[in-house]
Amino acid sequence: MGHPEKAAEFIADDERMHWHDKALWFVRKKRDVAAHGLDEWEELRRVASEIKTHTISKLDHYLEEFEKNAKEKGLHVHWAKDAQEHNEIVLKLLLSRGAKKLVKSKSMLTEECHLNPFLEKNGIEVVDTDLGERIVQLRKEAPSHIVLPAIHLKKEDVGKTFEKFLKTEKDNCDPTYLTREARKHLREKFLNADASLTGVNFGIAETGGIVVCTNEGNADLGASLPSLHIASMGIEKIIPRLEDLSIFTRLLARSATGQPITSYTSHFHAPVENGEMHIIIVDNGRSNIIGNEDFVQSLNCIRCGACINTCPVYRRSGGHSYGYTIPGPIGSTLGASKDLRTNKTLPFACTLCASCSNVCPVKINLHNQLYKHRQSVVAAGLLDFKKHTALKIATWVMKHPALMDFSGKLARKIVPKLPRSILYSKANIWGKKRELPEFPKNSFKELYKARKK
Amino acid sequence: MSSREYILNNIKKNLPSKSAELPETNIPHTYYKDKNEKFSTSLSSVGGNALWLKDQTVNEFVKENYKNLDVITSTCRAFTANTIDANQPNRPHPLEYVDLAVVDAEFAVAENGAVWVKNSDNRHRALYFLAKQLLIVVKKENIVDTMHEAYERIKFDESGYGTFISGPSKTADIEQSLVIGAHGPTAACVLFV
């Protein structure tokens, strides 16, 4: 199923669709207030974009510098060329230390690698500790958003889920109550964990350490209790200098949720006492994107989710409709770069309104990328037959002005007289949930000519 | 070929012919007329609170403001009325029962209500997250406007752990309703001395 089919399922519940739309727009508005509160906002975006572009253009150099400095600080560094190798490194680390219970904080990379099912198959208990991620994990769902994993759910849904798995009070869906119950449940998991795994927001080449940002404190709690801490990092998370964080920490949370900074911005440059810290550097297709100048900017992403919150298509179709680990504009371009055939509908899940590019804190040309991917879809012969034929006919008509004039005239005469049953028949996909405008008597061309006389 | 070589080679093969320039980070930025006031409003907007100590010791302040707590511990030199020693256990797990942890921060950041916590005297970093409540002690003069000045004060030449803490732990994962107290402390007060 492509995006249109899955989106159709989502919008079948009209009330929920509008509720979802509003929830995301609320977050977008908070972002605006935070961004407009700083006179230097655009300057921050410019510098952030330039730092990222620079880093990617010397990525091999910075990765080697990062590795060298991390090792000097006693951290272990591993390299994984793909998802499978990443998962095997994690499993081997756990098994060789007799670790059976793993607590995880948010990491979209491990979602991308399908780490959880792999570890579970091999007898490891994996607990996602971010509240939203725990909710979707219990429901056997994927996160529907990279920052707000359970944004598609109402508190009643969460209440029912907790009733079933955490034995909470029946029909109690008060967010504070549910959060407190989750805290108790997860505290026990933290205290009994053998190992922890976190994502990485930034890897600092200059110091060889990593930075992880959370509001809940789950990454820190996980990484500071058991003796083994594994951090999974995509190659594009590297920044050159510690001071670069002065730019990124000002942009990240403001863009994500409108907060001035996350509750915790933690800099890990050492394991806990008598512990071990391992960083796995993962490629999984990223290095191929560097070679494509149309899409290389997508590697600048700091995963704030601002483009997702603002996207009119995402807000009305939900994260699961994309069928890729990361939804929204950034997910659509990354997904298409990774596997165009599987993700061929994603570049079209876009109105080309460019709102995503305008809110992006690192100025990724998201809508341009989606426009380019569409051309690749057509060139690869992957466009839906009906859509392709309709576009071909439209192109042909538009290339012949006389024919265009004649078709217009005909349409203005005939269409208003057609009954709805024909006009909005199944063949007219455009007419689903859309009304045609009232047809004018004359075309623009005719009006223009008449005025000139 | 190792995966390390494979990845680095593939990056090299794909790199643009010219590398882009690395910009300066010291851009002109916001200054606040009253840093203390800005810090205070920033921190209360994220569920914490800031206080300035007057004619009192930290011990007296805690005695007056935190009553009926069983377990109080500290890795802060200005506070001595501990009920347990946080650095004594070999593993951090027993700190789960701490009601209040009094800890040191190096400086505060006005723009976002954060404090920089990096203390090699603090044996278990888990203390910052296991304690039910945090009282963070900062010297009055150690406050900066923005993260630009903050990072001028931070170094990681040696291994270690440091974190910016801005208020208590929180979540809005259930229907965007803000709940203070997720996995970490449910209250965080910054005390300027």
Image (cartoon, coloured by chain):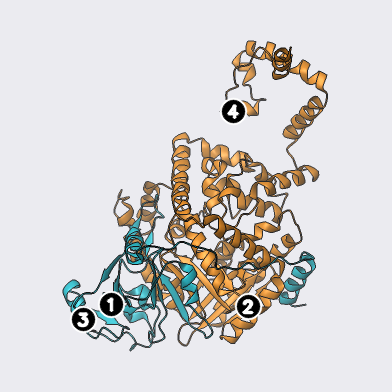
Numbered disc in front, either 4 or 2: 2
Chain letter, colour orange in render: A
Name the amino acid type tagged 2.
Answer: Phe
Q: CA distance from mark 2 to mark 1?
A: 38 Å
- Mark 1 residue crowding within 10 angstroms, few (<14) / some (14–19) / many (20+): some
Q: Amino acid at mark 1?
A: Val
Mark 2 packing: few (<14 Cα in 10 Å), some, or many (20+)?
many
Distance between the alpha carbons at the discs numbered 3 and 2: 44 Å
Write the residue at 59% across / 62% down: A48
Viewer-side label of 1, 3: 1
Residue underneath mark 2: A66
Instruction: Tell me the element at label 1.
Output: loop
Comparing marks 3 and 2, which lies closer to the viewer? 3
Q: Residues within 10 Å of mark 4 (few under 14, many from 20)?
A: few
| Residue A152 percent coordinates (x, y) | 47, 47
Task: Identify the amino acid type marked 4.
Answer: Lys
Q: Position of residue B193 (x, y in %)?
A: 28, 77
